[in-house]
Amino acid sequence: MNDEDIDPAIDSEPGYISRDNALQHAMTGDIAHLRVLGSHLTTRYAAAARGARIHGGDLSYLRRLLATTPGRASVELLLQLLAEQDAACGPMGLELPLMATMLAQHQTAAVLTQTVFADIPENDRLSELRTCLFHELLLRGVDPEEFPTLNPGSRVHPLAWLPDRRRALETEPDFTSHSADGSAGGVKTGLPTHGRLDPPTPRPTEASPLRNSVTVDEHNLIITAAEGNWGYAEAWVFRPDQPITPDHVPALLPSLPMDCVADLGPAGRYEIAARPVGDIWSLLFATASIGGFYGTGRYGAWGRLQAWRSLAGLCGLPFHASAEEVERLAEHSTWFHFQTDAEFFHNDGNDYAIAALAPDGLRLAVLAATDTD
């Protein structure tokens, strides 16, 4: 088969079908011609798709190469290429959150504020890049007051919910290491040696009368940090009639009706530690930003938002609560980090559970996440 076979129905140069001509063949019952036309177009489509994948991969490598090459010239060229590619194909495939985290890792704040945040055009095609980069730099300790052009972007962007300064509880964020050829990183889910509160074994096997009362909204908010990035996550909320004291939590958790402590028995592995809220935020941030076996994560900016959302859910605040409200309540809650050998956790990847006790002791929330489905 060659182009001459179907010249009346297809323009050989752009490769577009002549629909009027195809319609005429259909109306005269010339199905054989349409079969040849369909086969020819399918071949051209497959070749174009292969070419698009190859070019897309090459462009992705070039963007990564420019983002990781220090200096103003490479950043300016990257911005030019991103704007051109957005104008040609739209924002799909431009990896703007990834570009932001790579720029924050490999370029100085001075260079970025003189390029990315300077001379922003009125019809800004790279607003997502600038918004993400603002939060990436915050998390890396950049003070916006030292760089007047640095700004968080649109007030209607979802990331605008976040504080425009790094907060005290945002301690030691872990980031994936990026290069032009790939990325590497992992979430540190192990318990620390300090603050351990492991109860003695054998433990009592009597089940607690408390029952899970988590709502759909609470559940979805609590697991935000792990959603889409990890194998599986689950959440529970318990509301006792009488206040629970922090010293009762380590012994209480294994007795609650939760999959993450089921089938433990009196001597199964159950390890728990009290942790400051900053450690909990760091664990949630790493879960969201780095991701796990099933996803690359959301990188720094969106990972920051997801960590704060999970923190809000664990504290019992609604989705519309402000970051200031979340911070205030989180700092007054009591936090625990625990691990078990229950079947919920496969214990061949990253697994952990978090418990948050409200200041009044009348709400206990738990998030359990496993990196294996």
Image (tube, rainbow, N blue to C red):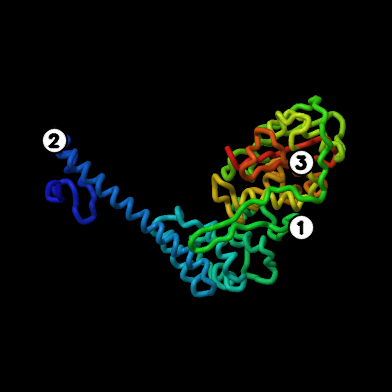
User: Dot 2 corresponds to which residue?
Assistant: 30
Residue 289, placed above or below residue 146:
above
Percent position (x, y) of residue 126?
51, 61
Q: Amino acid at mark 2?
A: Asp
The answer, for residue 156, to whether it is visible in the render is no
**Quarter of the image where the C terminus is located:** top right
- Does residue 76 appear left or right of residue 258 in this picture? left
Of mark 2 and mark 1, the one earlier in the sequence is: 2
- Does residue 68 appear left or right of residue 329 in this picture? left
User: Dot 3 corresponds to which residue?
Assistant: 271
Q: Nearer the viewer, residue 171 or 204?
A: 204
Residue 109, placed above or below residue 356:
below
Q: Residue at x 24, y 50 (%)?
A: 16
Q: Nearer the viewer, residue 8 or 195?
A: 195
- Pair 3/1: label in front: 3
Q: Residue at x 52, y 63 (%)?
A: 179
Of mark 3 and mark 2, the one earlier in the sequence is: 2
Label 3 crowding class (10 Å Cα cut-off): few <14, some 14-19, many 20+? some
- Does residue 359 appear left or right of residue 107 in this picture? right
Residue 313, placed above or below residue 300:
above
The answer, for residue 323, to whether it is visible in the render is yes
Q: Residue at x 54, y 60 (%)?
A: 129
* CA separation in Å, label 3 and label 2: 74 Å
Of mark 3 and mark 1, the one earlier in the sequence is: 1
- Pair 2/1: label in front: 1
Label 1, secondary structure: give it: loop
